Image (tube, helix red, strand yellow):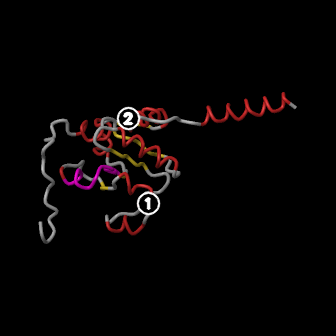
Amino acid sequence: MKTTIKYMVLSILALVFTNCRGIYEDSSEAAADLKKEVKTITVEELNALTDSGETYTLLDIRQANDYLTGNIPGAVSLPRGDLEFKIGDTDFWASQYMYPPEKTDKIIVYCNDGNLGTMSAATLKQLGYKNVYNLKGGFKAFNPNQDPNAAPKASGGCGG
């Protein structure tokens, strides 16, 4: 009886320790743990992809204010906090004059420095998207000379 209980406890401990990712101090630690699961694309590869005319969806997962300050041309603003809720929402995509990406479509995500992009790409993979990439280095790699004090661009709407 004691041997059986001992094996059960050891089995449970083995499952717990092999399935837990751990507790993280910040998002960079969590992103580092996920990097092995996420494919990356460099700025040069993104530019070549754009030049080739290949179809892909580019998601800027920073906050809307950051997107308005500067973004990669052709990117759709879909902040990280809304990603799971809007990635398949046809109304959201209709407001962008686009169709929602299919599970097999190429999706490239970027944030400011790459860490949140890694976590977002992992989330999209968990949601069943098969062809997801994170832009290595994020917007900082795309635009290394950005002004950290830049004000958001006017929206062009009726008050601004």
Label 1 belongs to which residue?
85
For residue 42, side relative to residue 67 (left or right) = right
Q: Which mark is residue 28?
A: 2
Tag 2: amino acid: Ser
- Could you say where residue 51 lies in the image, as x and y percent from the top left? 28, 44
Q: Secondary structure at mark 2?
A: helix
Q: Quadrant of residue 147?
A: top left
The residue that appears at 87% across and 32% down in the rendered structure is 1
Over which residues does the magenta segment extend? 58-68
Separation (CA) of disc 2 from disc 1: 23 Å
Tag 1: amino acid: Phe
Q: Are marks 2 and 1 in contact (CB under 8 Å)?
A: no
Mark with earlier residue (2, 1): 2
In depth, the one of 94 and 35 nearer the eye is 35
Q: Secondary structure at mark 1?
A: helix
Residue 60 is one of the magenta-drawn residues: yes
In depth, the one of 105 and 3 nearer the eye is 3
